[in-house]
Image (cartoon, rainbow, N blue to C red):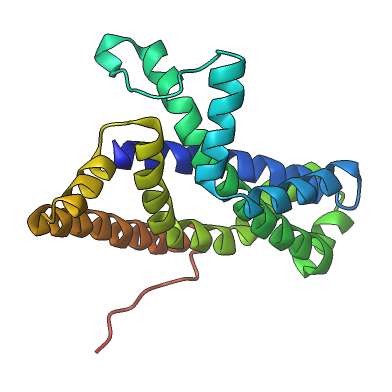
Amino acid sequence: MTLELGIASLLLSVVFSVLLALASAARRGKTLDRINIAFSMVGLSVPNFVLALIFIFIFAVKLHWLPSSGFTSISAGLGQNIRCMVLPSVSIAVGLTCGYSRVLRADLVDQLIGSDYVMLARSKGISERRILFGHALRNAAFGFLTLVGLNLGTIIGGAVLIEEIFSLPGMGQELVQAIQYHDTVVVESVVVILATTVVAANFLTDIVYALLDPRIRYERSE
């Protein structure tokens, strides 16, 4: 469950951060951009476990829209499974979205303002939308991808704590119980699994670099 929760949070944060960054960069200095910057500052200032408690109070206790705890497997119902995963995933994804969108927005603005290829594209009459999506986003994605790869450990660590808050079964609960009962073998096993996942994610990030920019090549050292 820890990896599933981490992946769900990662996907949510990546999708929404890209959308927010693109909207802010396209309307930089305007109302939407200012709102996004303010939202990012607030989201980065609040820890994910505090957001989890706030979401439980609002959406589970007051509005009764979503369950406050527990887990329903996919075999028991896809709809119930999604409802159980919404609050935990969003609790982790909010802070990540704020951080990712700020980095990507800044890189996009730098590309749109100071890049020669953008000026050339504009001189050819290419639309701003095509420049933003077809050129600037690809060149601004490197810092964004680096941050995503480096933050995977933070995502998994946050998932461990969020699992405890929402009573979700997974490696988070196993790790906490193993620490309480001094089960060294289980603790070491969980740490190795999570560390391997982080290393694999960083390796995939390097591969994506080469796919985005063919000029990047990783040569074997002699």
Quarter residue 204 falls in: bottom left
Q: Position of residue 67 (x, y in %)?
A: 45, 18
- What's the residue at 52%, 36% (across, down)? 52
- What's the residue at 30%, 62% (across, down)? 199
- What's the residue at 20%, 54% (across, down)? 179
- What's the residue at 65%, 59% (across, down)? 103
Q: Position of residue 95 (x, y in %)?
A: 58, 48
Quadrant of the image containing the C terminus? bottom left
Left or right of 110 on screen, residue 19: left
Q: Position of residue 68 (x, y in %)?
A: 46, 23
Q: Residue furthest bottom?
A: 222
Q: Position of residue 212 (x, y in %)?
A: 51, 58
Quadrant of the image containing the N terminus? top left
Image vertical order of residue 75 relative to residue 151, above or below: above
Image vertical order of residue 72 relative to residue 205, above or below: above
Image vertical order of residue 137 relative to residue 171, above or below: below
